[in-house]
């Protein structure tokens, strides 16, 4: 706590920004006097999963455009030990797909909240939906196009 203000940190890739991203950031905002949102760099993300569709600088600008965060910063590491100490963070909010991974922050006096995404939209689901829809459109176009066979003389 800094001057009786609760500082909350949340972070993510925020690729293909969607409703569940917004819900998590809004939840973090509800706990905070000061909300800091970290956006994972492309280098960090590719160290543990596929490269984001949206570039880091574009994802950063999307989060900066929200009125919810007070501060938006790049996130270079999944280890938040130094960040917590440097920024005097009181609480950390992360999606429940990371459940248990940040329990080590409790020892630093940081309350960790694993936000339940629940079912529905996720970046992975969006990518799959887009891919499947594209494949379906390709198949439909192939069926609609009359096949041209060469003349046999």
Image (spheres, rainbow, N blue to C red):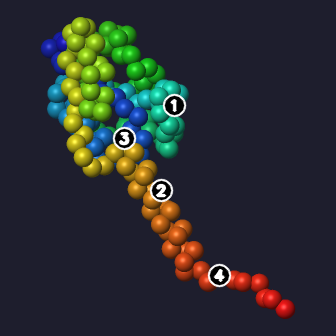
Most extreme residue toward the right, as rendered?
153
The kind of secondary structure element at disc 1 is helix
- The residue wearing badge 2 is 131
Q: Could you say which quadrant of the image residue 91 lies in?
A: top left
Most extreme residue toward the bottom, as rendered?
153
Q: Residue drawn 42% across and 24% down?
A: 75
User: Residue 75 vs residue 22: left or right?
Assistant: right
Q: On screen, 151 above or below 89? A: below
The kind of secondary structure element at disc 4 is loop
| Cβ–Cβ under 8 Å for marks 1 and 3 | no
User: Residue 17 vs residue 148: left or right?
Assistant: left
The kind of secondary structure element at disc 3 is helix
Query: Taking the image as drawn, is residue 69 in sight?
Result: no
Q: Earlier in the sequence, mark 1 or mark 2?
A: 1
Within 10 Å of disc 4 (Cα), the crowding (few <14, some 14-19, many 20+) is few
Q: Earlier in the sequence, mark 3 or mark 2?
A: 3
CA–CA distance in space, label 2 to label 4:
25 Å
Q: Earlier in the sequence, mark 4 or mark 1?
A: 1
Q: On screen, 114 above or below 21? A: above
In depth, the one of 125 and 62 nearer the eye is 125
Within 10 Å of disc 1 (Cα), the crowding (few <14, some 14-19, many 20+) is few
Q: Residue drawn 31% across and 21% down?
A: 101
- The residue wearing badge 1 is 46
For the residues carrying marks 4 and 3, which lies nearer the camera in this image?
Answer: 4
- The residue wearing badge 3 is 65
CA–CA distance in space, label 1 to label 2:
20 Å
Within 10 Å of disc 2 (Cα), the crowding (few <14, some 14-19, many 20+) is few
């Amino acid at each position: 706590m800094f001057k009786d203000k609760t500082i909350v940190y949340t972070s993510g890739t925020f690729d293909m920004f969607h409703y569940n991203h917004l819900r998590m950031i809004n939840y973090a905002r509800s706990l905070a006097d000061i909300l800091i949102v970290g956006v994972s760099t492309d280098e960090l993300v590719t160290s543990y999963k596929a490269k984001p569709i949206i570039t880091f600088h574009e994802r950063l600008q999307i989060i900066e455009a929200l009125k919810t965060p007070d501060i938006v910063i790049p996130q270079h590491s999944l280890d938040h030990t130094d960040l917590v100490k440097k920024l005097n963070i009181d609480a950390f909010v992360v999606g429940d797909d990371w459940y248990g991974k940040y329990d080590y922050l409790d020892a630093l006096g940081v309350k960790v909240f694993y936000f339940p995404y629940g079912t529905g939209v996720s970046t992975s689901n969006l990518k799959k939906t887009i891919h499947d829809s594209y494949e379906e459109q390709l198949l439909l176009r192939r069926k609609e196009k009359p096949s041209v066979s060469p003349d046999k003389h």
